[in-house]
Amino acid sequence: MLMNHAKQPQTALLQRILRSRLLGALTYPHSIDGYLEAIHPLWSAHQVRACITAVRHTTPDSVTLSLRPNRNWAGFLPGQFVQLNVVIDGVRRSRCYSPAHSAQAADGLIELSIKAQGTVSRYLYEQARPGMVLDLSQAQGEFYLPTPRPRRIVLISGGSGITPVMAMLRTLLNENHPGKISFLHYARTPHEVIYAAELAVLAAACPQLELIPVYTRQTTAPPGSGRFSAAQLRSLVPDFATAETFLCGPAGLMSAVQQVWAENGCSARLHLEHFTSPGATQDSTDAIHGEVVFARSERYVANNGRSLLDQAEAAGLTPQSGCRMGICSTCCCRKSSGTVRNTITGRTSSEANEDIRICVSVPIGDVALDL
Amino acid sequence: MNSRLPQLSPEQMQAFGQELDAIRDRVLADLGERDARYIRGIIRRQRLLEISGRGLLFLGFFPPAWIAGVAALSASKILDNMEIGHNIMHGQYDWMNDPALSSRQFDWDTACPGEQWRHSHNYLHHTFTNVQGIDRDIGYGVLRMSDEKPWHPYYLLNPLWAFLLAIFFQYGVALHDLEVERVLKGKREKRQTLRVAKGIWRKTSRQTLKDYLLFPLLAGPFAALVFTGNLVANLVRNLWSYTIIFCGHFPDGVQQFPKTILDNETRGQWYYRQLLGSANLSGGRLFHIMSGNLSHQIEHHLFPNLPAHRYAEISTEVQGICRRYGLPYNQGPLTRQFGSVLRRIFRLALPGQRQPALPAAA
């Protein structure tokens, strides 16, 4: 269900021609996109590309970008994320960001708010200019507002985890959502909240929105302060157990919230998005041992317990990689033998000749990779 | 090994290898924006040349448009095969982490499947350069390009075979990994041969469909003009790439080696073999680009994974190292180098051996 991007008929026809088998045969062995992008950087038959139209710095350490996507953009469900690719010093790098705009917005722009941490985000924070063209994926992810909308909704976010939740909130308010929406946002201090001004306006204008900012570094400011706790939640949102809750934030907040919901037996009503890697390092409970063999490059290293991608790069290899958090499968690689643990699921796998995502796989003992 | 080859002591050989390693490491550490901009710029120009070439051929009823179309399409195919395809498939741009420039995924506008090329060229030819009996680029299985190769009446037509190989070079390259001569001798497993043959058929038929059926048909009444235009462009590319490639390892003074040289070969000795087994072509910047920088064959063989547009600046350092170690650095203009290749093709048509000699000692 993609609401605001009903394709115009001529766009659909053009796309069908560009994606036709005939054009594929005429440009073989290259893709039609290689020719289109030579003419104009935004043109593509398959790839979503977007041009930056506005760059705003709303807090000291974040940047908000407005992007105009080309016609391949299929829209998004509020809460989903896109993988953004940028070229930094010649190297293509990618990171996932959740658009924060309303799925009902009429201007067709994608809005991304980016906190200046990590290589890609810092680059965008410093270098993004109107006119720049970026590569992105279609919207992905299972974290989005269900249809029909639940009536009573709780939104919880922390730090830059506000972006997917902001998309949900803006969409709900655009739809004149009839139910109550409680929005708990955790930040260290008030001036770190990316959408502070807009949220204040919305809260004043929309009676169904209950805005509850919580400042963890401040102990006096009403209504909430201090880190998330069960007692704090009960005083701020007493009916949380009967609402559908959408959560995105740093790992500490996420696990604290998950625990409270589990204790109250309402985990099924908690929907969440990990926006940072849940730690690509081996648990201290597993003894770190063994050797990692990179067969094709004839290199081997002593296992140091980090992800196979990190270890490959430390060994001087340049495997393809994308999101580095187990989403995009760019780093997918054949493991010929050995046991690895998936750092997201915690599951171990000892199958020979399986394809694994090396950014979220840590070796347990000897592992041989076709790299 | 030929006793007239310049000799280095084991210590010198090791130091020689370390100096070359240092060049490689320095360039690898310096890769970045400049290299990315270069290869993207070349690809963009190639794509625009191809679009305009194919477009002009549709107007081929106007002779200057036909000629310009053939010229643009020829240049496009040469760039695609040499500076772009050959170099990307070496992994020179893998560090950019871009699927479109990945050695594992790239394929080029020629009959040979990229996947097979990576095996026959990147692995066999570059690892075992100029080792007789292993490097199949010595004569490509059809020519006698080495004094050590036993003569046979078949080789009386060595020049004819060489000429035919030049004309049909893209198909010669495509069939390379099939190792026909080994198949004929029953030295190759049937199933493997079949798999390779299928890959060649798939690629070649799609190339043929594109250049000789679809584009001509699209031109309607001018189908014949587009057909011949594509034919000539492919021929120009074949002759040019053949000429450049034969100048890489067959001019006078380039050494070939017996299999025994591989025994316990050190890193320094490997560099030494690559240096003595390759020859450069001198020329301007455009000439180097249009030859895929294979005009810097020596640097390419020393550092096959470094972006080829860096070879020109590396070459002055390599020449300096060669001078200090008293090693030859084989370089000459295209006419001289190719002339000596032709002489070799004719000379080896006849039986008999000549002791290969370095030009200085001849």
Image (cartoon, coloured by chain):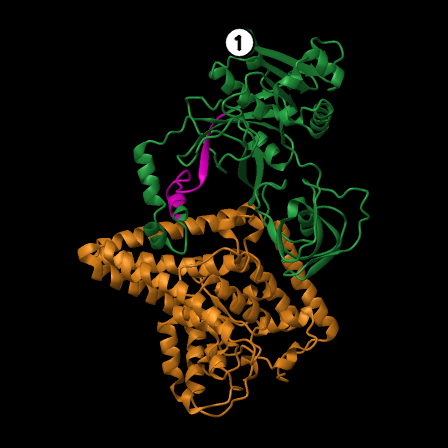
Asked whether residue A306 is in view, the answer is yes
- From the rendered image, report the letter of the chain displayed in orange: B
Of all chains, the one bearing label 1 is A
Residue at 45 percent across and 38 percent down: it is: A48
* Neighbourhood count class around disc 1 (C-alpha, 10 Å): few under 14, some 14–19, many 20 upward: few
The answer to whether B117 is drawn above or below residue B4 in the figure is above
In-image side of B73 versus A152 (left or right) = left
Residue B306 drawn at (x, y percent) = 57, 58
Residue B280 drawn at (x, y percent) = 51, 68
Asked whether residue B333 is in view, the answer is no
Q: Quadrant of the C terminus of chain A?
A: bottom right
Which quadrant of the structure image shows residue A59? top right
The stretch drawn in magenta includes residue B270: no
Say which of B291 and A299 sits in front. A299
Name the residue that disc number 1 marks: A206
Helix or strand or loop: what does disc 1 sit on? Answer: loop
In-image side of B216 versus B95 (left or right) = left
Residue A147 drawn at (x, y percent) = 50, 25
Q: Quadrant of the N terminus of chain A?
A: top left
Q: Which residues are magenta?
A: A35-54
Residue A181 drawn at (x, y percent) = 58, 14
Say which of B137 and A303 sits in front. A303
- Colour in which chain A is drawn: green
The stretch drawn in magenta includes residue A42: yes
Q: How many marks?
A: 1
The answer to whether B166 is drawn above or below residue A310 in the figure is below
Residue at 72 percent across and 14 percent down: it is: A234
Say which of B53 and A332 sits in front. A332
In-image side of B344 versus A12 (left or right) = right
The answer to whether B241 is drawn above or below residue A41 in the figure is below
Residue type highlighted by circle 1: Cys
In-image side of A328 versus A280 (left or right) = left
